[in-house]
Amino acid sequence: MKDFIATKAAARSLARLSDGERNAVLLDLADATEAQIPALLEANAADLARMDKADPRYDRLLLTEARLKDIAADLRKVASLPSPLGRVLKHSVLPNGLDLTRISVPFGVIGIIFEARPNVCFDCFALCFKAGSACILKGGSDAQDSCTAIAGLIHQVLQRHGLPGESALLLTSREDTDRLLKAHGLVDLIIPRGGSRLISYVRENSQVPVIETGAGVVHCYVDKAADMEKARAIVLNAKTRRVSVCNALDCLIIHRDRLADLPALMAPLKEKGVTVEEGEEAYGTEFLSLRMSVKVVDSLDEALEHIARFGSGHSESIVTEDPEAAARFLAEVDAACVYHNAPTSFTDGGQFGMGAEIGISTQKLHARGPMALEEITTYKWLIRGNGQTRQ
């Protein structure tokens, strides 16, 4: 546990930095990322060579020059955001004169366990660092070369600024995962980013508090009062903008009164290569590919029941021109992000104006939806007195 002890110590030093000092590191990392694009792509190519291009995770694993430039832009965006630390969340003075202030503070050490998504190294380090916390990164073996190269770049930048490399610790083995899950007292929070199997494993085995993120079984309900032009654009974007992400559409629900419109609704999807999986077993599946299911319902109530049964609490959408149906859907669907006449592809910290995100929380404790700077801080109470004693 020596490495975790060192990271815990590093977290204390990060908490002492000014926001300007943190921003300087992030801006330096953005420049270094652009300068090291060839080396990062070379490491990524080694990972890609071990994965079948038909694997739904291939696109998540893939780094390109454009994606790395976008990552650098995201780093600069995070640096430009207001600090989430030291915010006064509540203030009061008690009748006995005690002055109470609740302020936002760093978590300390945040562990992130993720699959074949090397960009997560950048996102999580940037957000944790900006929020004053150290991070422990455990990527999947599919992305090991990419993550090693990215962590090495982060360490170079930290060292240039006189900061300990343990501020961003990279773990590489399955045994490391189990050590992390048992690091009670050294790690303050663990966030798994990946499929349901990963999330279940972390939830069932962790001795450290967990916030679940990632798994998305996403629906779009086309109501009997839907505008079909809007519906076609929304469904197409939700499904095909990027099929391997957690906010991608998995199940189209359509009202029986609009069944005649289904061929026209599906036509642009078929042009993109989307296929429909039939049968009850397809419902509740997160496809992460050019596959989806379709459910025909007789009412809004039936659509709501289907989502309640098969949804994962991630993102759900309704397409309708009926304000009462929209209001019911927005009020009754139990998910982190609920949409009216817009695609679920907008569920993203960047799209919400939050900068990069550390994940999409699908639970209700502490944070829900995109987790950015504010969501990865906690708080403490400051009590100022003048010699008062309790009776």
Image (tube, grey):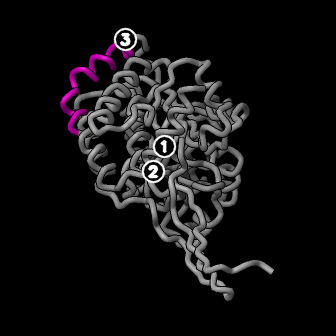
* 45 part of magenta stretch: yes
Decide which of 278, 106 is in the foreground and name it. 106
Q: Residues within 10 Å of mark 3 (few under 14, many from 20)?
A: few
**Residue 265 on image: x %, y %:** 44, 46
Q: Residues within 10 Å of mark 2 (few under 14, many from 20)?
A: many
Q: Answer above or below: position of 391 versus 226.
A: below
Which part of the image, by quadrant, shows the C terminus? bottom right
* 64 part of magenta stretch: no
Q: Residue furthest front?
A: 387
Q: Quadrant of residue 81?
A: bottom left
Q: Tell me the CA gap for discs 3 and 2.
A: 40 Å
Q: Is residue 39 something one can see in this rendering?
A: yes
**Residue 84 on image: x %, y %:** 43, 59
**Residue 151 on image: x %, y %:** 38, 28
Q: Residue at x 29, y 39 (%)?
A: 161
Q: Which mark is residue 11?
A: 1
Q: Are marks 1 and 2 in contact (CB under 8 Å)?
A: yes
| Majority secondary structure of magenta residues | helix
Ranked by sequence position, the earlier of labels 3 and 2 is: 2
Q: Horizontal placement of 325 versus 243: left or right?
A: right
Ranked by sequence position, the earlier of labels 1 and 3 is: 1
Q: Horizontal placement of 14 versus 38: left or right?
A: right
Residue type pointed to by label 1: Ala
Q: Tell me the CA gap for discs 1 and 2.
A: 6 Å
Q: Secondary structure at mark 2?
A: helix
Q: Horizontal placement of 372 versus 298: left or right?
A: left
**Residue 106 on image: x %, y %:** 51, 52
Q: Which mark is residue 49?
A: 3
Q: Which residues are magenta?
A: 31-48
